[in-house]
Amino acid sequence: MRMSKIFAWMMVVGTFFAGQEALAQNMIQVKGSDSEVNLVQRLAEVFMQKKPGVNIAVTGGGSGTGIAALINKQTDIANSSRTIEAKEEEAAEKAGVHPFRIVIATDAISIITHPSNQVSKLTLEQLGKIFKGEITNWKEVGGKDAKISLYGRQSNSGTFVFFREFVLKGDYSPNMKAMNGNAQIVETVKRDAEGIGYVAVGYVVNESGEVIAGIKIIDVAKDGKSAAYTPAKMENVMSLKYPITRPLNHYTNGKPAGEVLDFLRFEISDEGQKIVRKEGFFPVQKDWMEFNRKQGL
Amino acid sequence: MEKPSEASLAIEETNVGEVWLHKKTDTKDERIVSRKPQMRRLNEILIEKFFFMNGLLAILILLSIFSLLFVKGFPAIRELGWRSFFSSSVWNPTSYSTPRYGILSLITSTLMVTFGALVIAVPLGVACAAFISQVASPRIREILKPAVEILAGIPSVVVGFLGIILVNPLIAKVFGISNGLNALNGSILLAVMSLPTIISLSEDALRAVPKTYKEASLALGANDWQTLIRVLVPSALSGIIASVMLGMGRAIGETMTVLMATGNAPALTFNFLDAIQTMTSTIAIELGEVPYNTTHYYALFVIGFVLFLMTFVVNLVSDIILQKYQQVER
């Protein structure tokens, strides 16, 4: 009885010290965008293999959550699939945090539907109207007579904000179902014959440009006059023919140093960019790579 | 729920008047006997004070949560007025153009899933309780009771996940709609989650009905079914109602499950086949990213305050009913 008690205490104390040790090592915290979480996790895994002793923890929660964590000094790197807002920048400066941006990949926000849907291309304007709730039936855009069921993200999502600013330029329909992440949108649209949703391209396309099973990707045209392109092909995205592309960002507090800097350098290196491609996303566009160089990376 | 403290530490007064303290869980009764009367008196006072402090602490925590919610929510009420919260059904604080702070649709959504959950869970729960307490053989009871208790231990995120992959396509198929992420889905899941509360408390209430009632009824020629419906359930009614109210409190406050399964579309609706967004999911979604000390931030606390009032009233009413029922039994 007494021995087992002592043993139990030793276990408790032991795990406590073990925990302390883990904390004492450099644990780099990365937090934010759900669109980026899988990608950065993969990059971190490869980096940790190359550099034993470095620990990187990557968590999601949404771009807004990541930036809020950066401002509250709860994370080393914030993943954000949108740019930091003026309001957030103000709050950061007030808290003594100086957001420093680098671009690690290119994303094409993909519009997905059920494979049985007859509609295969939409213009930006039609998309905006659909998600604003001005177009509510598939037959208005060339489909069958059925109510459109909208899937989007929650307001803490960078994709939610980016899509709203870039495509809608207005408020989302109050009937849009706000899902918890890209994967949830994919899973529900698979099961909804009348559904439409927007997700990061890495969640629906693999390296060789193949669309995952059970999903159809809509081709998008800039306007009624131009042709529609799919985000699944690399050349469409890199040449900006596909209209809804965006840089995926990291934000740190000031220019990073040490292991964080090494990690960022690895991400934008050729090897890192290959992993980006493997995860279904696209390499950093030329202009943004120049931006990174100017930032001193 | 917390077990009463008597379960682990019991104070027994023997006929000699001595106070015995012993742990019930130990196989050997480790009895601490204080021989000196003064010491005993002191011990008694200390123990009494200790329990009193515990009780006080619970009330203190309750009051501080209440005041915290009010203080944090007050700036939003001062800025926008009560009316803008309760007269509009448009909740869109991060709007592209003008932020709106109407919580009517959120309140109706919460009430809808709660009501739906009760409609499903009450008949099932009470029937199950009646079965366990009156019909089941001791062997079946031994299996059923722990099973129901395990049901209470399923994490809400797991229930929510089942809502997405299991209940969602099922509802879509049954009602011929494109998807099943709606109030009905949330109701079904919340019913599953409040069942354990309803079953175990109703069962206790049914079991507390004196045996003589049952015997008298049977002796008068009533069959088992008549005895159950006409005698046992009415006698245990206040206990059953209290269990329903507690289950309701659980359903109102549940967050993760409804967040995952109800679709989160903030439009005002009274159709169970439409997507809804409850008060709890709104807070859970938005509190993570809202900039501190903004109107939006304070407005979320107003939602929390209203929600707290709702659960408080439900719990208070159930407590009053439970109290009455215990008095009757005595």
Image (cartoon, helix red, strand yellow):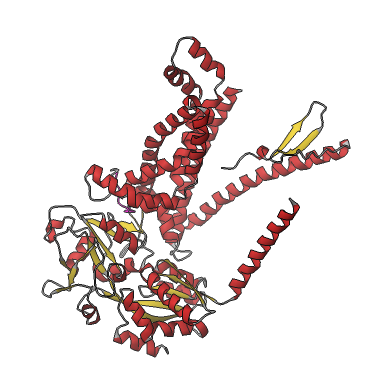
Q: Residue at x 68, y 63 (%)?
A: A13
Q: Would residue B287 be seen by someone viewing this image from the given angle? A: yes
Q: What is the span of residues highlighted in magenta in the rendered image?
A: B262-270
Where does residue A245 sit, x and y in percent of width and height?
27, 75
Where does residue B121 sit, x and y in percent of width and height?
40, 36
Q: Would residue A173 be seen by someone viewing this image from the given angle? A: no
Q: Residue at x 66, y 42 (%)?
A: B55
Q: Nearer the viewer, residue B188 or A10?
A: A10
Where does residue B177 sit, x and y in percent of width and height?
22, 47
Apparent side of residue B2 relative to residue B159 in the rendered image (left or right): right
Q: Nearer the viewer, residue B45 or A53?
A: A53
* Main secondary structure along the magenta-highlighted residues: loop
Q: Which quarter of the picture shows residue B56?
A: top right
Apparent side of residue A188 relative to residue B316 in the rendered image (left or right): left
Where does residue A11 sit, x and y in percent of width and height?
66, 61
Q: Residue at x 75, y 32 (%)?
A: B12
Q: Nearer the viewer, residue B246 or A105?
A: A105
A23 relative to A272, above or below:
above
Q: Which quarter of the picture shows residue B33?
A: top right
Q: Where's the C terminus of chain B, which quadrant? A: top right
Q: Nearer the viewer, residue B193 or A61?
A: B193
Residue found farthest to the top: B220
Q: Where's the N terminus of chain B, which quadrant? A: top right
Is residue A240 covered in magenta? Answer: no
Apparent side of residue B34 relative to residue B214 in the rendered image (left or right): right
A88 relative to A216, above or below:
below
Q: Residue at x 42, y 52 (%)?
A: B158
